[in-house]
Image (cartoon, rainbow, N blue to C red):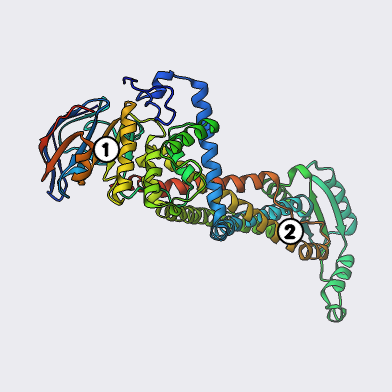
Amino acid sequence: MIQMHNVAKRYPTGHEALHDVSCRIERGEMAFVTGHSGAGKSTLLKLLGLIERPSSGELIVNDRNLGRLPRRQIPYHRRALGMIYQDFRLLADRTVYDNVALPLVIAGQYDRQEIARRTRAALDKVGLLGKEKFSPMELSGGEQQRVGIARAVVHKPVLLLADEPTGNLDPTLAWEIMSLFEAFNRVGVTVLIASHNVELIGRMQRRVLVLSNGRLMSDSHEAPA
Amino acid sequence: MKRTGDSPTRIQEPEPPSASRTAATRGFQPWLSLKNYFVHHLRACLASLGSLLRTPFASLMTAMVIGVALALPSGFHVLLSSVQSLASGWEGEMAQISLFLKPEIKEDAARNLAWRLRSMNDVAGVRYISPQQALEEFQRNSGLSDALAYLDENPLPAVLVVKPGKNFAEPDKVRGLVQRLQALPEVESTQLDWAWLERLHALVALADRGMALAGAVLALAVLFIVGNTIRLAIENRREEIIITKLVGATDAFIRRPFIYGGIWFGLAGGFIALLIVDGVLWGMRGPVARLAALYQSGFRLGMIGWAASLIVLLSGVALGWLGAWLALGKHLRRIEPS
């Protein structure tokens, strides 16, 4: 699913966020990226979602070479992904339903019944069925993050990328969110989660990639449970 | 992608992911993609209308500015074309050549000449005005009757008023006729009574050109108004644009509602322009009819016609569309997630 060969990312300011990172994540795997803040976790996820381009090295995600993907192909790459953010990134002026349905609408799904079916299914998976009409602002942090997850999975992506998905949540909610990711992984979705919550990652017993100052320091290579 | 471990009894389990490129596995379905295309457009079209209606006051203000800018050239165009049609109606009616005969020409000779002229095929009619008639008319109209009474003899010459034939009423042909009449031995001098019509034509042409240029400047103004409004709308929805880009929206998808926003502004502005023009014309109708009655003219101020209305609406739409494109330009590309 993800292949990195000597990937580096330098910003125009000269800051080198990633340095010579090589690794391989198979389809159906669930892995964590960890490290102190500024270690390059977010940068790594940004490269995978093509929010940033790698400066050098080869990065292949879902059979696409991201270093050479034309600009106009970026939307189609992102449609195969589900991205989850620490700050949720929900549209405050739309209902929960509209937020979750957005990827379907964008991808050209025009059948209202199909949109409704899939959106409700996604909301059901995260336990928010019945809150479709709410504004995201009316929900708690944990619920907002679950809306974000529903939006990330509604179009059945092959790869879920989560950047500090539990950063703003208390331990119980964080554990619930992690269980959700495990459930998605069980049905074949590749999941990559960036988190600095070492204690939580330890409990998950999954493969862990440790970044430090932009370098890949260790890779536990644990087989998926 | 393997689909394993998904037992049908566990309803709560998420569904397995679809193939990475769903469309590719479905194959190419031209009918479906065409329908999709139109549904996308319809959706963007209605959504942009909805978002304009959510801020009715601000939207109306923008549409009003566009309306006024479009109303000025189209209103003046209607006035000018009314004046032009009036003037061209007058050419046939009012173009007449006065032949002032030499003093020694007696009435018989003058009537004879009039009879000869009537037989010319580019002359529609000839009227003979004797010196006596001319004097009476002059006394009646000039208010100088007392002064004229002191004159020993009538200083006015006999006059033949020649009306050119309908098919010879164009300036060049009339001028040719005037030259031939001037060459007649009985004729002292000629006067073409339509210099003022030519001046009117020149004035109307000048006003027409002026309005075309002013119209172009105002069109430019509409372009900038729409452009600026759309640019502000883009800025207001910056966060939304970033989020939709993150979930895989193409540039075309993001651009579409703004383009339709521009089109709606242009269309609304066009309607407002039509209301303004028709309102102004309606308001002027009474005074114009009174003025025309004073000149014994049946002149009526025209309303803006269907064709002209359509042109106003279409120019509004075209300017709105273009203005939105100008605003989007490179701007949308600069709004990227980071």
Residue in the image at 37% along x and 38% along y: A152
Q: Position of residue A33 (x, y in %)?
A: 19, 39
Q: Quadrant of the N terminus of chain B?
A: top left
Residue B159 visible somewhere in the drawing: yes
Residue in the image at 47% along x and 32% along y: A118
Specify whether A107 is left or right of A208.
right
Give the amino acid type for the residue marked by disc 2 in the picture.
Asp
> Mark 1, chain letter?
A
In the picture of the structure, the residue carrying the numbered disc 1 is A50
Give the amino acid type for the residue marked by disc 1 in the picture.
Leu
Mark 2, secondary structure of its residue? loop
In the picture of the structure, the residue carrying the numbered disc 2 is B193
Q: Is residue B257 above or below residue A104?
A: below
Q: Is residue A144 above or below residue B64?
A: above
Q: Position of residue B276 (x, y in %)?
A: 66, 58
Mark 2 Cα within 10 Å, few/some/many (few <14, many 20+)? few
